[in-house]
Image: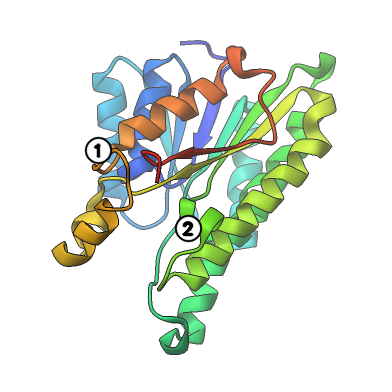
Amino acid sequence: MNEDKKVLVTGASGGIGRAIAVDAAKAGYYVICHYCGSQAKAEETLNQIKAAGGQGELIQFDVSNRDDCKAKLDELTAKHGVLWGVVNNAGITRDNTFAALSGEDWDKVIHTNLDSFYNVLNPLIMPMASRKNKRGGRIITISSVSGVNGNRGQTNYSAAKAGIIGATKALAVELAGRGITVNAVAPGVIETEMTKAIDPAVYDIIMSTIPMKRAGQPEEIASAVTYLLSEGAAYITRQVIEIDGGM
């Protein structure tokens, strides 16, 4: 494990976030696993990291709460120094048709999925950009094909994920001169607890739109993220990588 390569993964307590955290740890990164609600699930992620021979720790804060983020991330920087990478993954869904969508469900998704871009990254950007010798760093945001194409019943989610793409592209331009790459990964239908709850009839319709005729696995997202964290990805920035089976 390279002590200098420390990576924060938000939303690491399950699903795609857990797979990213474990895969990054296997690649030799020290992984700081963020969670908001379930400490038990986050500890399971950390247990999987340790079982795979990796190292890491847990951190808890609410990505939608700006003050909470800044306080915890300032403490993190004081403890560990400048991070090598940040994977901004934490997010939620509150699906409904737009006419039936409550203001609360709109706000909750926007605050958690989009505002977190600022809340998490802003306290960490200056330390990363101020590092001597332009040593670089990696920022990866997790968007969605819903943010690329839009999706019925997900106006709030699509808006947030599209906003992440725009913010990612703009930040990439600002940080390129410091050797910091900023990219988005846009997953399609990935087999997680969320997709298992989809009505089977609806799921069949969704599968018909995917040329590969299957859902993706969290590990297939994780492997792309781990590559983007690597030294080998130093010339890839401002990109949106769709991982969706050709959807």
Is 194 rendered above or below residue 99? above
Residue at point 25%, 28% (across, down): 48
In the figure, residue 162 lies in which quadrant?
bottom right
Residue at point 26%, 43% (across, down): 215
Q: Which residue is mark 1?
A: 44
Is 69 rendered above or below residue 84? below
Q: Is residue 98 left or right of residue 22?
A: right
Residue at point 67%, 24% (across, down): 137
Is 195 rendered above or below residue 214? below
Type of residue at label 2? Ser
User: Toward the viewer: 175 or 80?
Assistant: 175
User: Toward the viewer: 175 or 6?
Assistant: 175
Q: Is residue 93 left or right of residue 81?
A: left
Element type at marker 1? Answer: helix
Image quadrant occupied by the N terminus: top left
Residue 225 x %, y %:
48, 29
Residue 231 x %, y %:
61, 13
Type of residue at label 1? Glu
Q: Which residue is mark 2?
A: 146
Mark 2 surroundings within 10 Å by alpha-carbon count, few (fewer than 14), some (14 through 19), many (20 or more): many
Q: Is residue 237 left or right of residue 148?
A: right
